[in-house]
Image (spheres, rainbow, N blue to C red):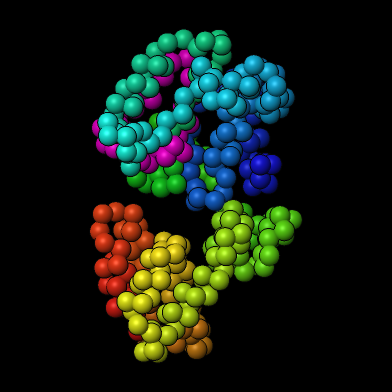
Amino acid sequence: MSALPWHAEHWARLQARRQRDAMPHALLLVGPAGLGKRDFLQRFVRGLLCSQSVDGEACGACRSCLLFAAGTHPDYVSLSFGLRKDGVQRSEIVVDQIRELSARLSMSSQFGGWQVVTIDPADAMNAAAANALLKTLEEPSAQTLLLLVADAPWRLPQTIRSRCQRIEFVLPAPADALAWLQAEGVKDAPGALAAAGGNPGLARAWGEQGALARRQEVRKDLAALAAGRGEAMEVVRRWLDNEPEQRLWFAAQAAADEAKAQAAACPGPLSSALNSEALGDWYMAANRTRDALRGPLRGDLLLLELLARWR
């Protein structure tokens, strides 16, 4: 993947620090999913480990680059969800993984340069793992760099966040995002960008996945329920069968658009009977339900409770 235009400023600053030998020992990359944080991270790590990098870009041909591409570079550790003893993937990063990492970092670099660790998603560390990481952050080894990636950094303890230098990826200007989408050949780029809330990475992905059609379906479903024509259980079934979290994103968007129309004294697109305060409450409830779908509660009951409040 080519470098994304909204990465340029962060990239230049990091490379300037590298040139001055002023690299921090820990970086925290945050921002909405879809802005390419992980592409940025991989590009930066490849360049940092490369023995022949130019302006921070990896050559792709040296021994270090070849080992990195093969996933066997001895000075690079990638930490994510591990496996339980029964072979099932964990849903969090646990303390044993951090302890193993600390033992690994106590050894010297095999190539005599940087030792690099990525923890992704860092916000999936449980409390014990986060506490164990603190010692490594407080007493970093020379030439060791920890890169933490988090879509939801507020889930990280403040003690972790305060010991990392933060790189925050924010939404680019709408005109820049639209120009990039059009250059990428995304159909109905304005519609895709609106659906993704101004996030160009999500807009491109959703444009390729048919998300705009789902967005229209969600609005039709909500309009039908508001008019008393729809059947809530049928809507629940269809939403659960196909991208339920994305559909809840679109449902929250629709409620926000309805509230904006009411504020402007215009007919709302969904003809909801809810007033602006109730629409605001429903918007927040839709977002809470989206988060709750990742947990142990039954999705059909969560959605049914939400739609029962819509009218």
Residue 243 percent location from the top left of the image: 45, 62
The answer to whether residue 127 is magenta is yes
Residue 139 percent location from the top left of the image: 37, 19
In the image, farthest residue toward the right = 183
In the image, farthest residue toward the front = 86
| The quarter of the displayed image where residue 106 is located | top left
| The quarter of the displayed image where residue 60 is located | top right
- The quarter of the rendered structure image containing the N terminus is top right
Q: Is residue 311 left or right of residue 120?
A: left
Image vertical order of residue 232 relative to residue 77, above or below:
below
Q: Is residue 171 left or right of residue 53?
A: left
Q: Is residue 54 left or right of residue 230?
A: right
Q: Give the residue displayed 71% in from the left and 27% down from the top.
A: 55
Residue 180 percent location from the top left of the image: 70, 55
Q: Give the residue displayed 46% in from the left and 74% down from the top.
A: 218
The answer to whether residue 121 is magenta is yes
Q: Nearer the viewer, residue 46 or 206?
A: 206
Residue 294 percent location from the top left of the image: 34, 54
User: Residues in magenta?
Assistant: 120-149
